[in-house]
Amino acid sequence: MTDPEELPGAVRVVFGQRADDVGGRRSRSADPGQRRSLAAIDPASTGALWRLAEPGRQLDANLIRIPPQGSIDTHAEPDLDVLLLVVAGDGTLGSAAGPHRVESGSLVRLPHGSVRSVTAGENGLSYMTVHRRRPGMQIKGRPDA
């Protein structure tokens, strides 16, 4: 488990309900078609398995699966804070403060500008990332016009 004292933004999450069943009632945004498609994904699949794609949304979310002992190289997100929730498996989150173990239920806030890498353990690692949606590209006038 990631100790919140070791990694700022890390907390332990205990799952007792389905994500679409909050407070004993179904969420209006739950889409049974998406739940079925996520459940049907081949367990050997890796990479980005799912992306939030509804038009007009303000958030982006991705479900990522890394194969056993696989990794995502060191990178930084310069503009957006990111929440990372481990949903299955375990591994190591590399950061400027050093490596931190993560496992199912670990929730970490990665501040914008932070450098990170992700390495899966021997059973692989599946996690969800959530962040503010990037604005679309815009056409602007020339600065000298």
Image (cartoon, rainbow, N blue to C red):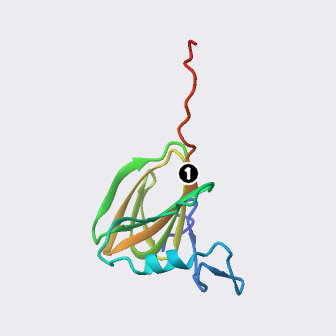
Whether residue 7 is visible: no
Q: Nearer the viewer, residue 109 or 145?
A: 145
| Number of residues whose C-alpha sits closer than 10 Å to that of mark 1, classed few (under 14), some (14–19) or many (20 or more) | some
Q: Quadrant of residue 50?
A: bottom left
In the image, 36 versus 76, the foreground residue is 36
Q: Which residue is mark 1?
A: 111
- Kind of residue sitting beneath label 1: Pro
The structure residue drawn at horizontal position 55% and vertical position 51%, both measured from the top left corner, is 111
Q: Secondary structure at mark 1?
A: loop
- Residue, far top: 144
Whether 75 is drawn above or below 31: the answer is above
Horizontal and vertical percent position of residue 26: 67, 82
Q: Residue at x 51, y 77 (%)?
A: 33
**Residue 84: image x %, image y %?**
51, 63
Residue 86: image x %, image y %? 47, 71
Residue at the spot 53% in from the left edge and 38% down from the top edge: 137
Q: Quadrant of residue 18?
A: bottom right
Residue at 68% of width from left, 75% of height from top?
Answer: 28
Residue 134 position (above or below residue 17):
above
